[in-house]
Image (cartoon, rainbow, N blue to C red):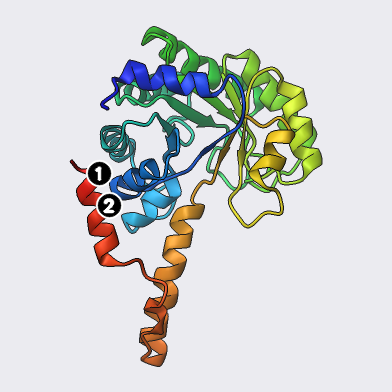
């Protein structure tokens, strides 16, 4: 089945209305198609995973490169794609408006805007500026028809400012500014998750699970989380296997790092079938 952009966006919005779903993060066309083959209902891009695939650090890629990547990912799958759109590739609201307009045109079903500045000394935009940027993103989406979801991200825990009260204040402000879904990457405990869910209810919350966790999907759903993403964790897992095997060859002259490698016939069979 080939779904239109409008159909993908409608399906994505419906996923946020009840239950809890996993939104895994592929970094290229092949990983996107494989995840679709496993039965996931939607995907999200990962700025870090994609950057590493191009030999760059996270945050180093240009807006044009990211937009081209989004177009490729949307075309690769019938699943809705949520864009990791970093901080909107602009410092001011006017620039965010233009960036979001271009992102929506790629066909993504949702996109996130962060409140991080990239400045280690002042890692977060003031809440007033961050809200202005969120309103700009909302206006750009509405001008394009309004069917793309807007995700507001409070980056406190990611930038070394793990203040839950400020995180919640920011998320509430982003919800009021028009964010459809709220996201505080880096929160981990049941208490933190429950507090965020309660604070922005009834709007849905995205939880990042980027490392091994004692929480199962069932646990997370019971806390009221609507969707779960994994960020760059799948890409890091792939890199981990590659790095261990490559180091074993380089440092020990051994090839046993290939023991857990995927079978070429299995990969060829999957992609041959998925491409039909």
Q: Is residue 250 above or below residue 205?
A: below
> Do we see residue 60 in this rendering?
yes
What residue sits 54% from the left and 26% below the top? 151
Q: Is residue 200 left or right of residue 179?
A: right
Image quadrant assignment for residue 88: top left
Q: Residue furthest bottom?
A: 252
> Which of 106/101 is in front?
106
Q: Is residue 58 above or below residue 147?
A: below
What residue sits 60% from the left and 14% below the top? 177
Q: Which mark is residue 203?
A: none
Q: Is residue 264 left or right of residue 234?
A: left
Q: Which mark is residue 270?
A: 2
Mark 1 lies on residue: 274
What residue sits 37% from the left and 41% below the top? 36
Image quadrant assignment for residue 19: top right
Indicate the position of residue 236 as horizontal and vertical percent values.
Answer: 47, 59
> Which of 163/45 is in front?
45
What residue sits 42% from the left and 62% below the top? 238
Element at badge 1?
helix
Counting labels gives 2
Q: Residues within 10 Å of mark 2 (few under 14, many from 20)?
A: some
Q: Is residue 269 above or below residue 182?
A: below
Q: Residues within 10 Å of mark 1 (few under 14, many from 20)?
A: few
Image quadrant assignment for residue 78: top left
CA gap, disc 1 and disc 2:
6 Å
Q: Quadrant of the N terminus?
A: top left
Element at badge 2?
helix
Indicate the position of residue 110 as horizontal and vertical percent values.
Answer: 45, 25
Indicate the position of residue 126 as horizontal and vertical percent values.
Answer: 65, 28
Q: Quadrant of the C terminus?
A: top left
Q: Is residue 53 left or right of residue 217?
A: left
* Marks 1 and 2 in Cβ contact (< 8 Å): yes
């Amino acid at each position: 089945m080939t779904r239109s952009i409008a159909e993908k966006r409608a399906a994505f919005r419906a996923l946020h209305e009840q239950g809890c779903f996993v939104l895994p993060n592929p970094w290229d066309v092949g990983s996107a198609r494989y995840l679709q083959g496993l039965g996931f209902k939607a995907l999200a891009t990962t700025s870090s995973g994609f950057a590493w695939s191009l030999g760059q650090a996270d945050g180093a890629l240009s807006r044009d490169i990211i937009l081209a990547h989004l177009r490729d990912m949307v075309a690769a799958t019938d699943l809705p794609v949520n864009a990791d759109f970093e901080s909107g590739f602009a410092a001011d609201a006017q620039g965010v408006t233009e960036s979001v307009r271009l992102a929506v045109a790629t066909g993504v079903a949702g996109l996130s805007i962060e409140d991080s500045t990239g400045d280690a000394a002042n890692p977060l935009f003031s809440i007033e500026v961050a809200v202005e940027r969120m309103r700009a993103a909302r206006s750009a989406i509405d001008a394009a028809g309004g069917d793309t979801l807007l995700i507001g991200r409070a980056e406190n825990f990611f930038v070394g400012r793990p203040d839950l009260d400020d995180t919640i204040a920011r998320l509430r402000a982003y919800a009021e500014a028009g964010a459809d879904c709220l996201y505080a990457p880096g929160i981990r405990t049941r208490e933190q998750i429950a507090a965020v869910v309660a604070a922005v209810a009834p709007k849905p919350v995205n939880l990042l699970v980027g490392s091994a966790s004692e929480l199962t999907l069932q646990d997370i759903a019971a806390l009221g989380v609507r969707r779960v993403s994994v960020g760059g964790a799948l890409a890091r897992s792939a890199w981990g296997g590659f790095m261990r095997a490559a180091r074993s060859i380089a440092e020990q002259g051994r090839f046993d790092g290939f023991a857990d490698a995927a079978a070429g016939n299995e990969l060829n069979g999957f992609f041959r079938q998925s491409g039909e």
